[in-house]
Amino acid sequence: MAIYRSEKQISKTLVKNNLPCNIVDEELYLFEKDLTKELPDVFIHFANNIKVTPHGVIFNKLHIYDQFLIWPAHKKEFGLFYLLRNYFSRKELILDKNKKYLICFDYWSMGYFHWMCDFLPKLLVAEKYLVQYTLVLPDNHKYTYIVDSLKIFNNINLVRFSDKQYISCSEAIIADKVSCSGDNNPFIMLNIRDKFLKYYKPLTDPDLFAPNLYVSRSKAKGRFIINEKEVIETLEQLGFKTIFFEDYSLADQIKLTYNCKNLIGLHGANLTNLMFMNPNSNILELRNEGDTKNNYYYSLASTFNLNYFYLQCQSKEPDNKQTFNVFVNIPELKKIILKMQVK
């Protein structure tokens, strides 16, 4: 038997999000499902003799613990055939039987948003165990922001394994997800923010300080603004500086957003950094028109007591929820910026 004991860490939590600052009645449907959320109990699970793939799929013999998959629908992708392929294509790495291990990662956690808002909350909940337990991460979790973000925790011992291996742990704990991906527990996220600010001390840096920032995705792999040149010209006339977070270290990204009053960006991981902005600052998210699903940054803005604004943007691929490209209505953009009282 693998999981032999579970301990509740957080009880069910009711989260109420603020309405967007520029909401109109006919667009309330965009946010309706996320105005109020009940988050489930969160547990730490103690286990013996578990095996873990580089995707964070946890199993024992031929039994997959699908409760640790990100979404129930992913059972089709990570089922018996996946497990059999794993056995045939990877070698087993038996970790030191004299040590205990902590499992928090999954198949999305190396992405910036998912690392900051899904992985780190799990790690925070399990923080008291870090003295006794060694954190396990696959080799592909080596981005600079991952390494730098782990510095906010004390007492981390880390072991890694390659994509060509799966690990076997004789003793481990597994952290529940704190919320469904896209939702967040305000208490946990505010504590994570405090840890970052305490460690990185983002005092105003004259070389980085800019009160009005537009974050471009033009260096990303997908999801672009079709008329971005016109957007940038308009925003620069209104006092905005265009930046690419890819050009900055995590420490400098924190400084930039901590000292920023108004942040604008297209829906995407760039907007995760709103978590470092000061309360009552303004965030404007450029969204795919009619998108009722992707309210991640709306919810985050409410958690951090930011003034959330949004602009629906036309897309040539309205049904594409992930890599859509959009066209920004410039007159509407100007109207919202006026509402934000940019100075």
Image (tube, grey):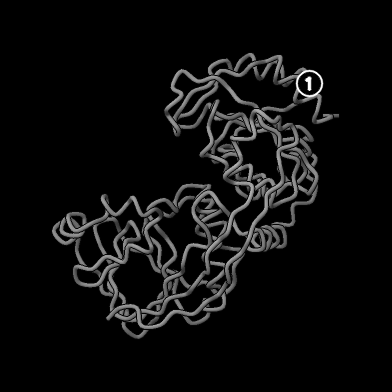
Q: Residue at x 80, y 28 (%)?
A: 339
Q: Secondary structure at mark 1?
A: loop
Q: Residue furthest front?
A: 25
Q: How dense is the environment of label 1, judged by Cα within 10 Å: few (below 14), some, or many (20 and up)?
A: some
- Quadrant assignment, res 26: top right
Amino acid carrying label 1: it is Leu
Q: Residue at x 71, y 29 (%)?
A: 24
Q: Viewed as shown, does residue 128 lie left or right of 2?
A: right
Image quadrant occupied by the C terminus = top right
Q: Residue at x 40, y 55 (%)?
A: 70
Return the residue nearer the eye: 54 or 151: 54
Return the residue nearer the eye: 132 or 284: 284
Q: Residue at x 56, y 62 (%)?
A: 121
Q: Viewed as shown, does residue 144 lie left or right of 260?
A: left
Relative to residue 155, is residue 290 depicted above or below? above
Image quadrant occupied by the N terminus = bottom left
Return the residue nearer the eye: 321 or 263: 321
Relative to residue 23, is residue 228 depicted above or below? above
Residue 63 placement (x, y as % from top left): 23, 68
- Look at mark 1 in the image and give the residue it sits on: 238
The mark total stands at 1
Residue 48 placement (x, y as % from top left): 32, 81
Residue 299 placement (x, y as % from top left): 63, 47
- Quadrant assignment, res 246: top right
Relative to residue 299, is residue 168 depicted above or below? below
Q: Residue furthest bottom?
A: 98
